[in-house]
Amino acid sequence: MSPLSPLTLLAGTSPIRSAVNAGFHAYARRRTRSLAQADPVEVQRRTLLDLLKRATETRFGRDHGFASIATVEQFQAAVPIRTYEDLWNAYLKDHYPTFDDLTWPGRIPYFALTSGTTQGATKYIPVTREMIASNTKAGKTLVAFHMKARPTSRLFHGRLFFLGGSADLERPAPGVRQGDLSGIAAEELNGLLRPYTFPPLDVALESNWDKKLALLAERSLNERITMVAGVPSWLLALFQRLFDLSGKSTIAEVWPDLEVVSHGGVKFDPYRHAFEEVLGSKSIRFQETYPCSEGFIAFGDPDTDLLRLLFDHGIFYEFIRADEVGTPSPTRYWLGDVQVGVNYAIIVSTCAGMWSHLIGDTVRFESLSPPLLSFTGRTKYTLSAFGEHLISEEVEAAIATASEETNASVRDWHVGPVFQGPLGYHRFVIEFLKPPNDIVVFRAALDAELIRRNADYQAHRAEGVGLPLPAMVVLKSGGFDTWMRAKGKLGGQHKVPRMDNTGTLTAAMVSLLRDSGQVEREITPG
């Protein structure tokens, strides 16, 4: 192990931390003022032209005439919308793992491995040095807005805890590494910032999630944690480990200096009640984030609780109406002509060479000045096996409402159809942190909220002609961990897939959980 530098040793002292904290407060004022004064549309236009200029001499740039493109409209005419599979098969597959001047200049140094959901094949998302800088800028912006919301913040008097996957990266070729995106971030973390972050590299490298979670809880117990970030379900699992070790009942007791919980990856509404209970202090802020493997998209705006689009860090955004996904010639929009209140699928062109890439997420703009949006779901996360046209936003909200009405807290959930007879029914698989007072009342509340939110679902629930009340499969504590472990997807940034429109994944999931003894109770439909 290399000796610690004098600066690293000094970073643990109060005067240095005070200076760093003051420096970030000054940055926060500059950054938030700069974004308030910027013209998002003009910044996005310049971002696209800069990306095109950089990639002009790549194979992709030559194939699509980047040198002669001067407007957004010309770009949209020249570059078709592509899924990951489209781009992979056309430009990347035959050259893996060395991508030299294909869609971005130079060699791609990293791949973020992701399957999107636990049922998908592994995707190799290019991560360039420019994308690392983009993600770093996004993270600093998130911190800036927290400090703006809390002018007395002492964030850098403690440690920022990032609950991610393993930092142990594979080396498929010289100069190329691949693995979890959080591992890439840990690898690239500026050494001067290590005294202000957690976990240390030796813990971050642990690949066994059960062992890592135990180490994280044990090692963080006596740390001065001021921020914690991660996927909500895994944060709750960490908190339970901390309670078991410390004998305390709230996170405010474990980490009295905690200022903010940064959460992302899934809709937070179903988890809010559980977090409010375990945190034990109303002074701890919730900070939503919207990162994905292709880039950092948005973060929670402290003034509105909506997502603020990051528009100045090397990503150009386009949008198509969600109901036009998969059609031959969808109308393409950008920040210059989007509309409030429309459900859009997001398309990105990035400083990692992902061009007009349909990332699979859907959003709805709530404001254009500044650009604020709501995450509404995944293009593949819809439930319309029987024509009911439910989207994940509606199911998330119904889960949250049912939890609130029955004094329950949900850790994770999944829903899919069961085809039976002339129609069939929906089957919810749910793991509770705190079970409802009455599961039958919970089911009725969930169903009532879906009826209220979705007219198609309401029509399909008409008595005697449509869907019955959904079936419920209630899991024992740790049930979803058992399923994720069986799929090799336990921990880190992996998430339980929310919706399965085919019913195949749902059936396999329930079968495995039954066989492993993880089902506590089942309620039949109707």
Image (cartoon, rainbow, N blue to C red):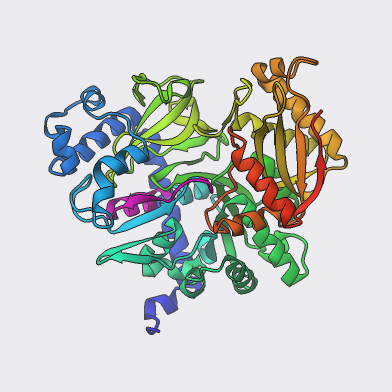
Q: Is residue 337 left or right of residue 384?
A: left
Q: Is residue 468 left or right of residue 329?
A: right
Span highlighted in magenta in the image: 117-138
Q: Nearer the viewer, residue 301 or 360?
A: 360
Q: Residue at x 44, y 66 (%)?
A: 167
Number of dots carrying numbers? 0
Q: What x and y, as percent, mark residue 345?
A: 44, 29
Tell me, yes or no, if residue 282 can be seen here.
Answer: no
**Magenta stretch contains residue 449:** no
Tell me, yes or no, if residue 320 can be seen here.
Answer: yes
Where is the N terminus found, in terms of image quarters? bottom left
Q: Residue at x 60, y 25 (%)?
A: 384
Q: Nearer the viewer, residue 417 or 449?
A: 417
Q: Furthest-right residue in view? A: 438
Q: Is residue 331 left or right of residue 47?
A: right
Q: Residue at x 43, y 21 (%)?
A: 324
Q: What x and y, as percent, mark residue 358?
A: 38, 34
Q: What x and y, as percent, mark residue 109?
A: 28, 59
Q: What x and y, as percent, mark residue 128?
A: 29, 53
Where is the C terminus found, in terms of image quarters? top right
Q: Nearer the viewer, residue 108 or 459?
A: 459
**Magenta stretch contains residue 121:** yes
Q: Is 253 above or below relative to 424?
A: below
